[in-house]
Amino acid sequence: MEIGIVGPGAIGLLFAFYLQKNEQDVTLYTRTVEQSEHLNKCGITCVQNGMRETVFPRVSPLENIKNETHDYTFIAVKQYHLEEILPYLQAEKRLIFLQNGMGHLHLLQQIQGASVAIGIVEHGAKKENASIVHHTGVGSTKFGLIHGEKKQFEPLLPAFSSGLFPVALENDWKRIMINKLVVNACINPLTALFGVQNGELLTNPSFHKVMKQVFSEVMGIVGDLQCGEYWERVCTVCENTAHNISSMLTDIRNNRKTEVDAIVGYLIQEAEKQQKSVPTLSFLYHSIKGLER
């Protein structure tokens, strides 16, 4: 099966590693020629439970994707890069988007001429350098159909045969996206603002109280009555990833743009539509925007 992956970030490297390891025909697309040359030389190394393994998929600059066709193409760039990436993908027939947040759904619904799915990734992944990714937490990936036929994506599932990379097609994918959005909104911006690992949101009483305030505002927006179940999920993720540094904190420390617009910004927009006041989320949003470089 010929599979394209756009974006050599932590998730892009992780998907490329496991698909290539399962003997799929993978091409990873990078922004620059220098990135592709480095990855073609070094391969992709995945570190999991102290074990290291390297695979060698093809790697090519993004501009070359227009000359190729793939059975499936994964887009693993940050949400704020999507609009500049989409023109390169006009020939692709099956697209799977792996972004955090929900602010991009309206953009995906406008794509014509292709079947479109989203992938909700629950793995922990941390990029050590351009060619090494740490698989820090085994989760699952759930695919949901934006438009097209479900049967078009069913042949993709056997491409992920590893027990460390379970996948499934979900009908109620929006609920799963909301679940992940709640977790991301409660953890990522707070760890970025406070400069702490995920677990400190549980062990520090003051941070824990702020996280509850954020959670309360988020649940008021998403309108789900199962607050106890969602709160338990947030705390479980904090506990299971206690020593992890969130992607948003990593972005702040590396002077990169964050995904705060895709996560907190989206929630604020939804609150405005519902005419609800969300002072804590607003404070969080502007605080992170102020820290961005």
Image: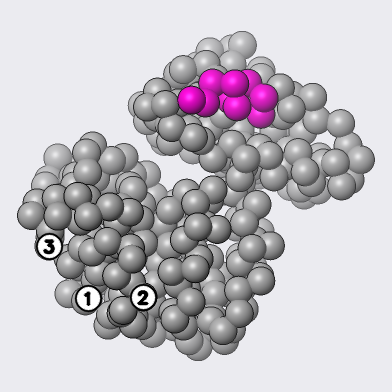
Q: Secondary structure at mark 1?
A: loop
Residue type at mark 3? Answer: Phe
Judge whether 117 appears above or below 197 on screen: below
The residue indicated by pointer 1 is: 24
Residue closer to the observer: 274 or 199: 274
Residue sitting at x 61%, y 45%: 262
Q: Secondary structure at mark 2?
A: helix
Q: Which residues are magenta?
A: 285-293
- For the residue carrying disc 1, how many other residues have a C-alpha within 10 Å: few (<14), some (14-19), or many (20+)? some
Label 1 or label 2, whichever comes before in sequence order:
1
Q: Which circle, 1 or 2, is nearer the viewer?
A: 2
Residue sitting at x 28%, y 40%: 127
Q: Is residue 83 visible?
A: yes
Residue sitting at x 77%, y 43%: 269
Q: Is residue 290 left or right of residue 216?
A: left
User: Could you say where residue 114 lies in the image, as x and y percent from the top left?
Assistant: 53, 81
Mark seen at residue 100: none
Mark seen at residue 56: 3
* Callout 3–callout 2 Cβ contact below 8 Å: no
Mark seen at residue 66: 2
Residue closer to the observer: 127 or 124: 127
- For the residue carrying disc 2, how many other residues have a C-alpha within 10 Å: few (<14), some (14-19), or many (20+)? few
Is residue 289 on the magenta stretch? yes
Residue closer to the observer: 63 or 4: 63
Q: Which circle, 3 or 1, is nearer the viewer?
A: 3
* Callout 3–callout 1 Cβ contact below 8 Å: no
Residue type at mark 2? Answer: Lys
Report how far apart the C-alphas of labels 1 and 2 lie in the structure: 20 Å
Residue sitting at x 66%, y 19%: 210
User: Could you say where residue 130 lies in the image, as x and y percent from the top left?
Assistant: 22, 43
The N terminus sits in image quarter:
bottom left
